[in-house]
Amino acid sequence: MMILKILLKYKYIYISIIILIFSLIYTSINFKSKYSIKDNLIEGYIHNYKIDGNKLNIEVIGKEKIIGNYYFKNNEEIYNFKKKYKFGDYVKISCELYYPKESGLFNQFSYKEYLRQNKIYLLMKINTINKTLNNNKIRYSIKNFIVNRIESILLSKKYLYAFMIGEEYYIDSKVKDSYQINGISHLFAVSGSNITFVVMILLKIINKFKYKYLFIFSYVLLYMFLTDFTASIVRSGVFFIVLTLNKIYKWNIRIIDILFITLSLSLIYNPYLIHSVGFQFSFIISMYLIIFQKKILKYKNYIVILIIVSTIAFLSSLPIVLNNFYEFNLLSIFLNLIYVPFVSFILFPLSLICFILPFLDKILFFFTNILEYSSLMFSKIDFFKIIIGKPSFLLIIIYYIVITIIMINPKYLYLLIICLIINKLMYYSFYPSIEFIDVGQGDSILIKLNGNKNVLVDTGGILKYEDSFKRINDFSIGDDVLSPYLKSIGISRLECLIITHGDMDHIGGSEAIMNNFNVNNLFLNGNLNELEKKLIIYNPKYLKDNDVLKINNYIFYILNPSYDTNENDSSIILYFTINNINILLMGDASRIIEEKIIQKYNLDIDILKIGHHGSKTSTSINFIKKTTPYYGIISVGENNRFNHPHKEVLEILNNNNVNVFRTDYYGSIKFIFKDKLLIKTGRKYEG
């Protein structure tokens, strides 16, 4: 009741609530693309593009915004593209259009939904790009000038991109991950502090100019364009304009009401901002700081004020952090005390100076190195990291009620601890389950046992790029798919990680898993290749034929017959039973190994993980007839270059009445062993 009284005394909140509801309804509507899926020629202006290694990601505005990828064949082609194409150029793109696919993972970020929230409904697979007109728009000319200037500043250009035009893409992915882990990633997104700093300088310079505010507003609007209307900048820019108008015309509107007006105007301009994490962070933190500013300002000590501000920012953003990253770092309160002034008063001003005086690049580079190395160091301190899992929508609301109560009276901090415990218990494994995780062309299987014991078999992985085309943001199955997913379901510890063999599509994410989670035991097959040798630092144990693993009341039998010069035939093969349901995981073992198994064992299988992604080297007719599986799981990537699964294998399974589930169709496939077997899939498939 007290919380409602606090909020409802602000009259503009009613308008904001109405517009919030409208935004939620509007953004739930599935609008259709103005393009046809059959279109193969797209015309429009180059709004943005990024080059990373040999990959071009380009954003074009024609009938609507549309993005696509093109892969350069050599360095000369990259050089020629950079020389020829500028922002604002009118181009014709020969391409194939396709719909973005739903995420196949439970509980995870949906790229399709993200695109829809940015009004992008189709993607391009680009064949050729041809320029027909040079840029003739002033706003793009300014952007081209800024980008060309940044490109000439070799050492520190990635931070100039971040601070000048809101482009964090060029910051190394591991460094960005460390910023997120430490809770300081918001410092590298252009925000209100950036606008305020520049405006203060401009006002000093043009203070006596008659139309100074018109000039300042023009700068703010231009900055919003240059940063591609980044959510936090839209909030900050609109807030600044309304605040200044309030001062000029003496409207006497309170700051909190200006914030609600800003929220309303921003969502009227773009209702999809409501789904932006940056916008949520920016608005929520600002709201709590404004509401409790009297409490903050009653303290006179600058350090105490900084600590309180940092704590309020931490608490108010906690539900958003958990909803998107599934963990929090208690150290972030302390780290923000260090990094906020460092970035705001040293790095950002120095970046602006460096943009004007490029010869100071080495000084900026020195400070950015301090920033990166220290952040990487702090991110390795695991003691303060707490993995909770993704909260439900209802729990997020409860979080904010509790957080508001705590800010009014800190003695109720225990309520937040109770909420965190409830959040964690949401993912406690009361029933055992096995999940075949959608990792594309690869294997990764999560077995959750009673007592919250978790076993991970394989980690997926993808082939690395050539050194000449090394990417800044190289995609990692371990860091970008598996780790976030495991964290989202509250997993912080694994009883064991079993790597069946050393192929990249099984072992590729293993180092990330070992680094990101507490793993009690790592098991390898003992037939080590170069990839497996990298894991020796983690003190692995080696499994051999006839070994037995006991975890709680469950027994895992190791059936791989012998080590083999063939990597696939050295796969660890696991046989185990959960609630009287027999499960066999074949790794990448071939028909030769299958034959040896059925000669040695009399197995009656309920759930079979099909060997080698459905390749014709595995899954013989004899093996299927002898083991009689009811379900067959094929872990395979969509449109993979190996053409897995093979038609012959699918025919064998179909002819023997095996119910086939494929990860390229269904996404992740989860079997939950309740009184009755329950099957869940990451996406619906009607094929």
Image (cartoon, rainbow, N blue to C red):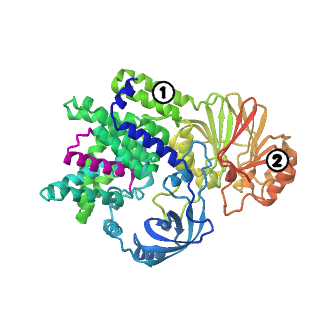
Q: Is residue 220 visible?
A: yes
How many marks are shown on the rendered structure?
2
From the image, tell me which residue sits under label 2. Answer: 658
Q: Secondary structure at mark 1?
A: helix
Residue 362: x, y in percent?
27, 60
Left or right: 53 with respect to 548? left
Residue lying furthest left: 208
Q: Is residue 158 visible?
A: no
Residue in front for this viewpoint, 451 or 354: 354
Q: CA distance from mark 1 to mark 2?
A: 44 Å
Q: Residue at x 22, y 58 (%)?
A: 214
The answer to whether residue 644 is above or below residue 604 is: below
Residue type, mark 2 in image: Val
Instruction: Identify the mark at residue 419; answer none if there is no mark.
Output: 1
Q: Which residues are magenta?
A: 229-254
Q: Secondary structure at mark 2?
A: loop
Residue 269: x, y in percent?
40, 52
Residue type, mark 1 in image: Cys
Left or right: 110 with respect to 667? left
Quarter holding the C terminus is bottom right
Query: Which of the 4 image quarters holds residue 415?
Result: top left
Magenta segment's dominant SS is helix
Residue 271: x, y in percent?
45, 49
Left or right: 386 with respect to 252? right
Residue 64: x, y in percent?
50, 63
Residue in front for this viewpoint, 378 or 541: 378
Q: Earlier in the sequence, mark 1 or mark 2?
A: 1
Query: Which of the 4 image quarters holds residue 79?
Result: bottom left
Residue lying furthest bottom: 132
